[in-house]
Amino acid sequence: MELSVTLREPQRRTELFGPRDRYLRQIRDTLGVRLHARNTTVQIVGEAPKVARAAAVLESLQEMLRHRDYLDEHAVDVVMAEIEEQEDGGDPQAITVFSREALISPKTDGQRHYIVAMFKHDLVFCLGPAGTGKTYLAVAVAIHLLKIGHCKRIVLVRPAVEAGERLGFLPGDLQQKVNPYLRPIFDAMHDMMTFDQLKRFLVNDVIEVIPLAFMRGRTLNNAVIILDEAQNSTPAQMLMFLTRLGHHSKMIVTGDDSQVDLEPNQMSGIIDAVQRLRGCTGIEILRLTELDIVRHRLVQQVVARYAKDPPSPEGARNSDQPRQKPPLPDSRE
């Protein structure tokens, strides 16, 4: 099929096409069509559904340029995602992300409550064992909000704390040192967008990954900020992190308070925070349980058995008082 789209403002073709036709190539590579710009038209060639989608994208981009001075690659991605969502008519219970194949749906009542909380509240704490989807669903909600234009960036944060290792002892520059700690977040994001999209977002700081220690002094507006593995933050670090929340932003704090890797007798930041902030208006605190685990069925049994008799890390804390978990409302209440 072949279709021509007329440029409404030919004098602004540079803004529409991007530097060296970058945005046209982005549309071409993503949708699988051929594009030829000729004078005041863009000729689109390819399979009928793809041609129709490319034409709708170009029309939407022209409309967007009526209200702004320039476009960027993120804007092109958002428009393409919106057009695809309109055509597909997605399930209202599902979270749409950039990857067409990845439609994220809650699998348990606890996960459903968690997703509703993230959309409803600007600050959400979620505790629970491994495999309950704490990180995965937080990333999915953040990417969905980015896709539909309700936030401008995503900031992914993790404490650089591991048993027996320190960040400074690892080889390489900062990014190479941080990558092992952020690998679970990257794994989730690879399920929800293409490698090229993720690379563009990282290069343009639309998605930023950063160790918790480097958050001091920042104010984050129009963003979704996720603090993962928050059980390994200290109360002082948690206070510093929570006060980074800016206008039109959301914070999601996740952690497993049964797996704290801090020094003996050091209070976990997420445990301290939920004790202090329980009952505050606009803040949601919930706990997922082994019933919400969606990994291999054996993970539920492993978590349940270890919960009966928690191990003492390195044997160093055997003589210490066990950390007390704060009583939290069950996510299904």
Image (cartoon, grey):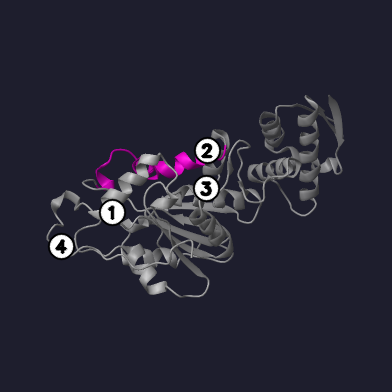
Q: Is residue 210 magenta?
A: no
Instruction: Please determine whether, in this image, residue 157 is positioned above or below residue 302.
Output: below
Mark 1 and mark 2 lie on one chain; the one further toward the N terminus is 2
Residue that numbered label 1 is attached to = 307
Q: Helix, strand, or loop for circle 1?
A: helix
Image mark for residue 107 = 3
Q: Measure the alpha-carbon separation of dots 1 and 4.
A: 18 Å
Q: Nearer the viewer, residue 217 or 52?
A: 52
Q: Is residue 36 left or right of residue 280?
A: right
- Residue 326 position, x and y percent, is 33, 68
- Mark 2 = which residue? 191
Q: How many marks?
A: 4
Along the horizontal axis of the image, is 210 left or right of 63?
A: left
- Residue type for callout 4: Asp
Kindly identify the residue that appears in the image at 57 percent across and 47 percent down. 105
Cα–Cα gap, marks 2 and 4: 41 Å
Residue sitting at 56 percent across and 52 percent down?
A: 141
Give the residue number, with chain letter if any, for mark 4.
320
Q: Circle 4: is it few (<14), some (14-19), or many (20+) Cα within 10 Å? A: few
Q: CA separation, marks 1 and 2?
A: 30 Å
Instruction: Residue 2: give x, y in percent of width and height.
Output: 85, 25
